[in-house]
Amino acid sequence: MPGDRLTREERLRIEDWLAGGLGYAEIARQLGRPTSTISREVARNSTAGVYAADDAQETAGRRARRRKPVRPAGQVSDGLPSEAARGFVDRFAPLLAATGLPRMTARVFACLLISDGLTSADLVRQLRVSPASVSKSIGYLEAMALVLRRPDPGGRRERYAIDDGAWLRAWRADTDAHGRIASAARRGIDLFGADTPAGARLGEMSRFFGRLSEQMGDSDLAEAVGYDALTVVAALVHAGRPLALDALADALVWPRGRVLAAVEAIQCRPAIADPLALRIVGAETFGLAAREDRLSPAQRDAL
């Protein structure tokens, strides 16, 4: 596997292929290794300009024994994971990439996942990639709300880390994005018309992402203003007519700000009122109507 130490068998093949006139790039391709690994191996372990597998194996072994003892699996030293942790990254990153995450971003994320924070330079050394690749991946992860920047103690560089709140932030970011897609699709229905092919497709899209947003947001719906929002919906249904903000506040015996927050919640997350939709009929006056995308043109005609 790329990144592991070369085996004696691989060194024997390198010796044979070099004798046969193969270049470093072709040898690397045959072994499934980076070209830099082959060139570095030949440069470091040749004797008097000649590469011999047995001599290279012995030289590499002596060099390895002079190194510091290997740390326990997963332990991090100076920002760089141990060999066992590198193996975990090599196995875990492809699984993340299979979900749609870019391959390099998946590797950066896997490295951060098993560390307490790494600088850009740490990631460059660990992954053996360019600073630009790391920077692009960090930007991608920040856009998904998965990575935080922290000052590097005793240094001028920033450290990137995944904290305990990353999963909740990512969940909320997805939920909000689904809600915005549903709202945008509903606006498209108004533009193209619900009885057009485009309107029908947008209606189906709006319903799907609306349900997805609602299901993903159920856990915190009642913790904020969701309960108040449902009360406002019930009040407008009971009244059977549009009501001004002040009238709603008086009827519910709520502060004006509480009613306004509930109305804003319905506007931000239309699925709260489903199958109804909030309608602004005047200055701070609100009503309800059946969502147009809930019924097909034929169903509306039949009713």
Image: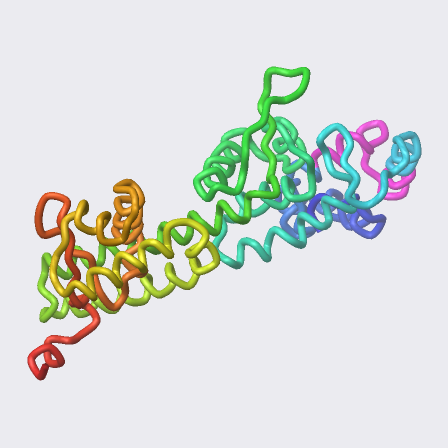
The x and y percentages for residue 289 are 15, 64
The x and y percentages for residue 193 are 9, 64
- In percent of the image, x 8 and y 48: which residue is there? 282
3 over 96 or under it: above or below: above
Callout count: 0
Q: Quadrant of residue 120?
A: top right
Give the colouring mode of the picture: rainbow
Report whether residue 90 is seen. yes
Specify the segment rendered in magenta. 39-58
Nearer to the camera, 279 or 46: 279
- In percent of the image, x 65 and y 53: which residue is there? 92
Question: In this view, which residue lies farthest toward the bottom?
Answer: 302
260 to the left or right of 121: left
278 to the left or right of 268: left
The x and y percentages for residue 43 are 75, 30
The x and y percentages for residue 10 are 78, 50
Report whether residue 15 is seen. no
56 over 192 or under it: above or below: above
21 to the left or right of 187: right
- In percent of the image, x 44 and y 49: which residue is there? 172
- In percent of the image, x 27 and y 62: which residue is there? 273
Residue 264 lies in the magenta-colored region = no
Q: Quadrant of residue 256?
A: top left
Quadrant placement of the C terminus: bottom left
Residue 56 lies in the magenta-colored region = yes
Mostly what secondary structure, the magenta segment?
A: helix
Nearer to the camera, 124 or 146: 146
